[in-house]
Image (tube, helix red, strand yellow):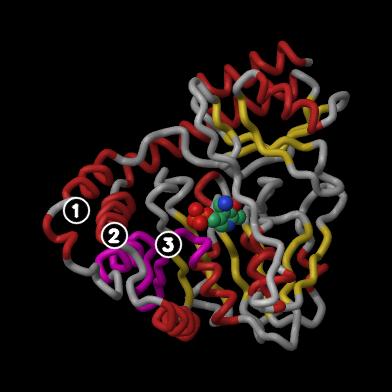
Amino acid sequence: MSRFWSPIVAALKPYVPGEQPRMANLVKLNTNESPYGPSEKALEAIRAAADMDLRLYPDPVALGLREAIARRYGMSVGEVFVGNGSDEVLAHTFAALLKHDRPLLYPDISYSFYPTYAGLFGIEAVEIPLNADFRIEIAGYRRPAGAIILPNPNAPTGIGLPLSDIERLVSEHSDQPVVVDEAYIDFGGESAIALVPKYENLLVVQTFSKSRALAGLRVGFAIGQRPLIEALERVKDSFNSYPLGRAALAGATAAIEDEAWFEKTRAKILATRAALTKGLEARGFEVLPSQANFVFARHQNHAGQTLAAKLRERAVIVRRFAKPRIEDFLRITIGTDDECAKLVAALDEIL
Ligand code: PMP
């Protein structure tokens, strides 16, 4: 702390990203990355982008990538915004859409970036508790609000809301922006993109970090009607007019066009998730019903902190949250079958 800091910075609780440890033979199941390499077509496009053209600035409006995303989701290019990971898209969203005189609502037990952003932008945040089954109850959001944000499926629970609930929320809050953070939507959820043509207050945010296996490239996007996207563009243009570098534009464009790779890896992750869920349940874990590329599980007799530490001694890293209500849960990313077998073998030694 220094007297030169702004009061907002002094009060900030910065987000703590998941660990990226460098250890040999590590089974890394802590940050929900894909266990599979990206599409070979994406890699080729990135390699091809590593040429003399790197001396030139990238397309300031990322037109090619936005066109590819628009085609994939049946939207028009003006309804697509792209940024460096969905975190940057969310940051621009907070700056663009949030009001300072009315609170932002989001679930209590959710993505821990939201309170950080709310703090950074000086926005009052109201956390709406999950119900006893760790589900989002949309009835809890019927209160004065400046905006609502929620992940679907929720993180770290992995539980998704049906599209009918999202639609009710969006239509009941037609005077506020409703932001649906669909970082994990491709693993079994129902995307709200289908509702965008109907609702001017809906913004859907997605990422290339999970189902496209490109967390290292940093690409995310938002889909919404033109006025919401224009607000994001105004913020972007006030910071930096290059949403993405040339390699990211090339790689992400090839990735979104590689439907075969997408379907194959997604099916594999869903099959592994089903098998891992069974394996954990057979060993005394309660596993919340996941529609994401991770499971959220707690053991009936073992504390979460102890389990996470003992797994770590065996080079298996999972994510644990110190928050009340969920301190005994482990959030376990769906790895390859081999990685999940190693996790289960380590648990068999521990339990
Ligand atoms: N939203 C949620 C719910 C997430 O879990 C994450 C990943 N930590 C993100 C957004 C951000 O992902 P990225 O910036 O890699 O797109």
In-image side of 318 versus 208 (left or right): right
Residue at 82% across / 36% down in the picture?
328
Q: Earlier in the sequence, mark 2 or mark 1?
A: 1
Which residue type does callout 2 highlight?
Leu
Residue 229 image position (x, y, % from top left): 45, 79
Task: Label the magenta part by its dominant secondary structure.
Answer: helix
324 inside magenta stretch: no
The number of discs equals: 3
Residue 347 image position (x, y, % from top left): 70, 18
Quarter of image, res 167: bottom right
Q: Residues within 10 Å of mark 3 (few under 14, many from 20)?
A: many
Question: Badges 2 and 1: C-beta atoms under 8 Å apart?
Answer: yes
Which residue type does callout 3 highlight?
Asn
Q: Magenta part of the protein: which range?
A: 63-88
- Mark pair 2, 1: CA separation: 9 Å
Residue linked to disc 1 = 49
Residue 274 marker: none
Which residue type does callout 1 highlight?
Ala
Residue linked to disc 3 = 84
Query: Looking at the figure, which quarter contains the N terminus?
Result: bottom right
The answer to whether mark 3 is within 8 Å of ligand 1 is yes
